[in-house]
Amino acid sequence: MHEALRIPEILSHICTFAEKCSLARLARCCSRFQEPANMVLWEHPPNILPLIRCFPGDVWSVAESPEGSSELSFMRPPGPQDWHRFIDHSRYVRYLSTNMRGKPMSLHREVLLLMAALRPAVELFPKLRTLSWCGAGGVLDCEHLPVVLSLTGLSLQFVSIQCWPLHLDQKMILQTSLALLESRSPRVQRISVRFKLRTHHRPTAPSPMQTLPSGFTNLGEFVHRGSALGEHSFKALAGLQSLRALDVQLPCGLSWSVAGMSSQPFTNLKKLVLATTLPSYAAFSFLLALPSVEDLSLIITGYSEEREPGLLAASVRRQSLPSTLSRIHITHEIADWQEAPALSSHHLRPFLEFRDIVEFSYRPPFKLSLDNWFFTDMAKAWPRLRDLCVACADRNITAHPSLPTLYILPAFAANCPDLSKLALTLNAEGRVAKCHRVDEEPPSASKSDASKSKLTCMEVIASPIINPGYVARYLAQVFPEIVSFRASEFTDTAQGRTWRLGWEEVGQYLPVFTDWQKDAEPR
């Protein structure tokens, strides 16, 4: 054997990139490779079934069904002498999932109960850090979750529960599991719970998680989606000093009070993701201020009688601190706002009070009535801006009262030196249509004031256009470093197809004009 193969780090590196079949052979046939091969082979098993097959062959069996699925069950209870191989391999497991992979196979409900009752006095998964639980379609039933958590230990840090059925709330399985997790794995850092039924289809669906244990002192991230978070759970989260990221769904008609809430709620919260209706978020913004939040994402769900577009920006400004908030992302899950008033520039003015914005994305399903002055003021207000998206989310809306023109772009090139991505709904008609010469010098983009913009990616969304050659020439002068250009979300109408072809023509011209622009620069 080569001397290099006596170095453990080299053996580990070889096993990291080896295929599963090769690792299995190395673990069985080569004593020097056995330990590093087993570490990689069992670090991330597809689910718990391969581990249960480590019991002797007379302990378990697989019964095939006529439908093509199968079930693994115990033929006899495992005795103390039957646990050796299971314990030997389970000590390597760092990530355990219950997802179904390959041929459908389930686990008989009594298998885990017997394992929990007859387990030896050792920790079965001493290195397990991540547990990914699939509540629907996995190899285990939801009732097994408390049993599996009883087999884990102090090393567990990340728990992800997906597709959890809401109808199980009567059995309190989820509540019991969280209490068990608190007692056995108090160092857990991330808990994610996503329910099978989404609440914008049934807004009144309550959460099975009535309250959250207060012992998660190291919890840094909490996710609760698909069902509205309860008031008691929210107040328990508000008192966690370690919480840095929160992703939850607020109930419709929010009527919480500050009674029982920490005097300094969410003191270290940096990232907040809320799925909510407009009225609920407005009420939430009156409930408490979040001065420490730096990254805010709002997902507006469901139908609401409150359709005032300006309500959103005013609520964000009320709740957040202008000197702290640097990332704002707003989306609408349901575009059912045809009767809503147009989104005007004055509706968005409160956002300009946040002076340290790095990323801003807002795609409302309203008609747009935005002027050039607003975007010019935006460029001046956000000198640290790196990523900007302001566009209509409803592609069926083509008749906007007012759209910004191309001539807002020099303001971003001059005032936002770090801007690298830009996505807008623009008007490239009107004044541009009167310019028929491609080589005509565009206004505000003269050679005497060469652009220093670093923007590399640009997207136009459902935007009207005339004279693609002039537009391409203009974009090349304002953004000479642009390398990626995309036009998207046009309607399948004669007008939409004409606009799409026009912008595709711009994309074809742009590389030529950017190279021309670089060659024309003084050396």
Image (tube, rainbow, N blue to C red):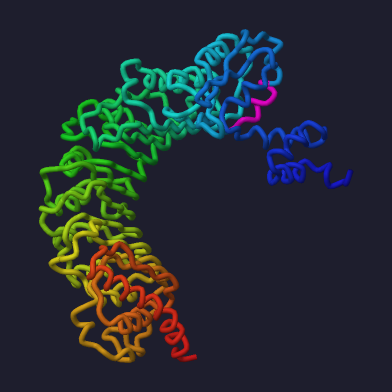
Using the image, determine if residue 453 lies above or below residue 462.
below
Q: Tell me where residue 446 appears, x and y as whole percent.
A: 32, 88
Residue plotted at (30% across, 53% down): 328
Q: Where is residue 339 in the image (x, y as percent from the top left)?
A: 10, 53
Which quarter of the picture shows residue 1? top right
The answer to which of 431 and 65 lies nearer the viewer is 65
Q: Relative to residue 341, is residue 52 drawn left or right?
A: right
Residue 360, compared with residue 43, is above or below; it is below
Is residue 381 a member of the stretch shown in magenta?
A: no
Q: Residue at x 41, y 37 (%)?
A: 221
Residue 369 x %, y %: 15, 65
Q: Position of residue 240 (x, y in %)?
A: 36, 32
Query: Which residue is most to the front?
Result: 66
- In this view of the protein, can residue 285 be seen by the observer? no
Q: Left of 259 or right of it: where is 292?
A: right
Residue 92 is a magenta residue? yes
Foreground: 16 or 241?
16
Residue at x 12%, y 51% (from the top left corner):
308
The magenta segment is 86-94
Tell me if residue 250 comes above or below residue 423 in the rendering. Answer: above
Left or right: residue 212 compared with residue 429: right
Residue 224 makes an appearance in the image: yes
